Image (cartoon, rainbow, N blue to C red):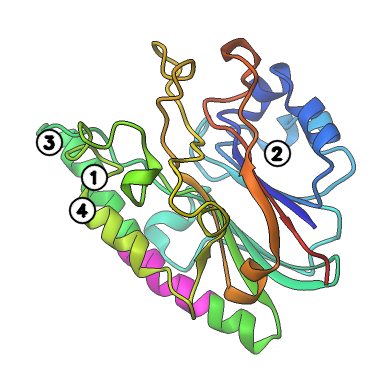
Amino acid sequence: MRVATVNVNGIRAAVRRGFADWLATRDCDLVALQEVRAPSDLVPPEALAGYHYCYHPGDRAGRNGVALLSRAAPLAIREGFGTPAFDAEGRYVEADLDLNGWRLTVGSLYLPKGGRADDSAAELARYTRKLRFLRSFRPYLTRARLRAREQGREFLVMGDFNIAHTRLDLRNWRTNGRSVGFLPEEREWFGSVLGPRRLVDVVRRLHPGEDGPYSWWSWMGNAFTTDTGWRIDYQLATPALAAAATAAGTDRAASYDARMSDHAPVVVDYADR
């Protein structure tokens, strides 16, 4: 079972840059998308070819939007995670699926970036709002995981978390100690949702002690060329599913011009059940 997550940074732009070719070539069974940024009727059909599709576009025109593409039809779909302040924004969609022998509950997440590391009132408000999101989403992850277990399902949440968990997850960690996305309270939150009986960072499990593999690089400067990136896109799975992962990494484009987004797909192969 091949599973991928990718922040497409606008599905229409990503299709122009080769997303549909990547999708057809990679032959995934399940794909989570973030920042789709399009009304439902304007999502290019070639971006969905061969897949069942559930999409939470949100109420912010040209922003956000999360989706799941799957070879099997969803048995149930849920939008948001029970927090009115965020549920309308198109940041989380979840589905129950039976796929390749697995009974799954799967979520696609676009977590708020949280602003920049400066002292302006606007940026501070954005970061404070990110912390509110984190505080609300952590107990939901526990509820969703336990609900899935009660139903005999494994739980998998994937997407753009906008947090680099450890020093291994960004190239310039020494100079980013005060940068949003690598602040102590964000990293503590991320660590708190992981555990041998909770959720497992699947890519890190298969790449222990390695730098990266990074999943995001700025469009600006030489960040992509020099691989000065951040690993902020994750697949977090319950232990039994994580233990079935056989290969994991990022589909880093061959060159700057070949990129379909500022994020690279994070792809994991799980043994069929």
- Alpha-carbon span between mark 1 and mark 4: 13 Å
Over which residues does the magenta segment extend?
135-144
Tell me: 256 left or right of 71. left
Q: Camera-side residue: 169 or 75?
A: 169
> Which residue bears the numbered disc 3?
121
Within the image, what quadrant is residue 256 found in?
Answer: top right
- Residue at the extreme right: 50
Q: Position of residue 112 (x, y in %)?
A: 38, 45
For marks 1 and 4 on the same chain, the one whose residue lies earlier in the sequence: 1
Looking at the picture, which amino acid does disc 3 mark?
A: Ala
> Which residue bears the numbered disc 2?
40
Tell me: 44 left or right of 119. right
For marks 2 and 3 on the same chain, the one whose residue lies earlier in the sequence: 2
Residue 180 higher or lower than 16, as above or below:
below
- Alpha-carbon span between mark 2 and mark 1: 29 Å
> Which residue bears the numbered disc 4?
184
Looking at the picture, which amino acid does disc 4 mark?
A: Pro
For marks 3 and 1 on the same chain, the one whose residue lies earlier in the sequence: 3
For marks 2 and 4 on the same chain, the one whose residue lies earlier in the sequence: 2
For marks 2 and 1 on the same chain, the one whose residue lies earlier in the sequence: 2
Q: Which mark is residue 127?
A: 1
> Can residue 140 be seen from the camera position used here?
yes
